[in-house]
Structures are given as C-alpha cells and as structure tokens.
C-alpha cells in the first residue's frame, strides 16, 4: 500500500514536459512539431532574440522552420528576416551567405567592377561564380547608375536618405549578388525577396469600385462649390452605384461611360451635376425594376457558432 502511495505522489510531482531538442551544427533544433512549439515558447521568452520575436512564439516557430529549411541557426534567421509591407523578407547579407553555403558553386560569389569611384556614372558591378556541376562561369547582370536611377533605388525612403547615396559601393555589390542568385539559384532563398526589393516594390491597393455613386457625386459638387463636406444625412441619401445591380448590359455600359467621364480630377462642375442626375435616374430605375424576391436579407451566422452542425 505504501509503495502505491509513493508511486502516486511521484507522478503528481512529475515536472512539466520539456521539449526534446537535438544539438546540431546549426544549434539546438526540435525534433517534432509539438516540441517545436514548446521550444518556440522558450525562445520567445528570451531577451536575446529581436523585439519582433519576443513574446511571439508563433513568429519564433516560423523562424525555426525557415532555419531548418535553410540549414542555418534560427537566431540567424531572426536577425536577418524582417517584415516589409506585411511580407517576410531577408536582408542581402543572408541571401549571399545562403548562396555561398549552398554548394551549387565552386567558390563564393565574386565581383567584376568597372570604374574606380562608385559615385560616378561610369561605375558598374556584376557578380559571377563557377557552377560546380558544369564548371561553367556564370555572370549576373550589370548593375549601373542607369538602372539604379531608372528603378528609383536612389530615392529617399520613409524620410531617410537612400543608402545608394550614402554607401553606393556596398549597395552595388549587394544588388549584383542578389540578382545573380535570383537568376542562377532561386531555390536557395525559396523565392523569398530581399528587404531592398520589398522596399523598392510599390504597394498596390486595388479599389473594389472607383464609382462614387450618388452620395460621392454630391460631395464632389459641394466641395467644388466651396461648401466643404455635405451633411451626413445628405451623404446617406440614395444607394451608391456599387450597391445597385444593373438589370442588363446596356445599363452597365451606361454606368461605365459615366465612370470614365467623371474619373478625371479636372472635370467641370456642370459635368458632375449631369453625372449626378444620370446616377439618380439610374438608381430610381433600378429600384423600380428590382425583383422583390431578390431583396430577402439572410442573417449571417455569428462568428464562433458551431460550424460542424
């Protein structure tokens, strides 16, 4: 009896499960997904990791996954992968390091440089390396000032001067190596772009419908006449064009024509008023032709309800 009690007490006093990790050439690594998440929770409590990983075990787990795929330390990934425009991006130094350690090329990336001063227009750089499987020397594209200025890489970003203005020589080599990797070994970075590429890519925000509708046209007219924004009650008067469904292709074509007419910022106020009259008339026709059976409103199932029936 006493022996059973001792066993029970030992089971109660059993310490919490700790993740099983293996010591590898790239540091401690978990052996399965459950241990991986527990390990990520431990890493997230560390103050050594960058701020965007502290108390963020989900981010840490993604970094651990990338480190396993790339064969580098998870701490290296955390120090060299950033979020730019809501997309993960690695810095150029990690991109070059991954290429050099990939084993695809005989030696690390080398550079061919033309010109003595990186600030002069005749300066250009390209990267090259010898592919191990074929022994062929591969050359990347030239990076010169014509390309830099044409792509706007030298423009100010977020109120700070571009690094192309403060450290052009380093930027030429970084970009040449990244473009070389993109051309000859894209699998190394698994398609991930670099921080510089992400920052140079303009953010495209697609509008669902550029038509302002009745309320939008009224507001534009009020602003042109110097009346400022119209009253809220007037803004809500009438459905917008995006809320109404054309009864046929002809009506849709008419609305597209109106859209083109008043899309210009230089449109005259009388044209805005004419567009407003057309929009109001189209809305009235839409309401008259509307099928009552099609206006039935269905109540959406609340979030968190039982989706399994």
Image: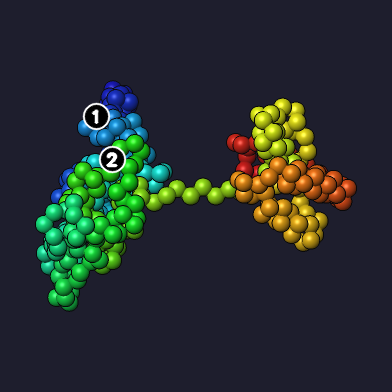
From what the image shows, is residue 81 above or below residue 71?
above
Horizontal arrangement in the rendering, residue 190 relative to residue 284 (left or right)? left
Q: Earlier in the sequence, mark 2 or mark 1?
A: 1
Look at the numbered disc 1 and give the secondary structure of its residue: loop
Q: Residue at x 33, y 31 (%)?
A: 55
Residue 266 position in % (x across, y down): 62, 46
Image quadrant for the N terminus? top left
Displayed quadrant of residue 253: bottom right
From what the image shows, is residue 34 above or below residue 146?
above
Crowd class of label 2 (few under 14; some 14 to 19; many from 20; radius 10 Å): few
Q: Residue at x 11, y 57 (%)?
A: 116
Query: Mark 1 highlights which residue?
Result: 47
Horizontal arrangement in the rendering, residue 121 relative to residue 55 (left or right)? left
The scheme the figure's colours follow is rainbow
The numbered mark at residue 118 is none
Q: In this rendering, does residue 258 appear at all?
A: yes
Front label number (2 vs 1): 2
Q: Residue at x 42, y 49 (%)?
A: 202
Q: In this rendering, does residue 32 appear at all?
A: no
Crowd class of label 1 (few under 14; some 14 to 19; many from 20; radius 10 Å): few
Displayed quadrant of residue 239: top right
Picture mark count: 2
Look at the numbered disc 2 and give the secondary structure of its residue: loop
Name the residue nearer the viewer: 119 or 215. Answer: 119
Alpha-carbon distance for marks 2 and 1?
A: 31 Å
Name the residue nearer the viewer: 24 or 255. Answer: 255
Residue 28 position in % (x across, y down): 20, 43
Q: Residue at x 19, y 60 (%)?
A: 122
Query: Mark 2 highlights which residue?
Result: 161
From what the image shows, is residue 52 above or below residue 187?
above
Residue 270 position in % (x across, y down): 74, 44
């Amino acid at each position: 009896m006493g022996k059973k009690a001792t066993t029970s007490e030992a089971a109660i006093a059993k310490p919490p499960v700790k993740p099983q990790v293996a010591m590898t050439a790239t540091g401690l690594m978990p052996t399965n997904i459950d241990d991986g998440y527990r390990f990520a929770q431990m890493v997230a409590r560390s103050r050594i990791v960058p701020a965007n990983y502290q108390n963020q075990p989900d981010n840490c787990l993604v970094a651990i996954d990338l480190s396993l795929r790339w064969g580098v330390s998870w701490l290296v990934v955390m120090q060299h992968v950033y979020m730019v425009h809501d997309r993960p991006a690695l810095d150029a130094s990690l991109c070059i390091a991954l290429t050099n350690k990939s084993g695809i090329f005989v030696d690390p990336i080398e550079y061919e440089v033309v010109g003595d001063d990186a600030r002069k227009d005749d300066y250009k750089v390209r990267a090259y390396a010898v592919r191990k499987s074929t022994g062929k020397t591969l050359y990347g594209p030239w990076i010169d000032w014509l390309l830099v200025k044409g792509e706007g890489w030298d423009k100010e970003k977020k109120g700070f001067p571009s690094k192309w203005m403060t450290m052009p020589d380093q930027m030429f080599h970084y970009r040449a190596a990244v473009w070389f990797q993109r051309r000859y070994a894209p699998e190394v970075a698994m398609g991930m772009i670099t921080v510089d590429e992400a920052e140079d890519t303009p953010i495209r925000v697609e509008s669902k419908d550029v038509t302002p509708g009745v309320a939008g046209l009224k507001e534009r007219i009020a602003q042109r006449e110097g009346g400022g924004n119209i009253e809220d009650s007037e803004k809500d008067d009438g459905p917008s064009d995006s809320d109404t469904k054309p009864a046929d292709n002809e009506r849709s074509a008419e609305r597209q024509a109106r859209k083109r007419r008043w899309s210009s910022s230089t449109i005259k106020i009388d044209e805005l008023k004419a567009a407003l009259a057309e929009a109001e008339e189209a809305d009235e026709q839409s309401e008259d032709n509307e099928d009552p059976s099609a206006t039935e409103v269905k109540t959406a199932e609340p979030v968190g309800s039982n989706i399994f029936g």
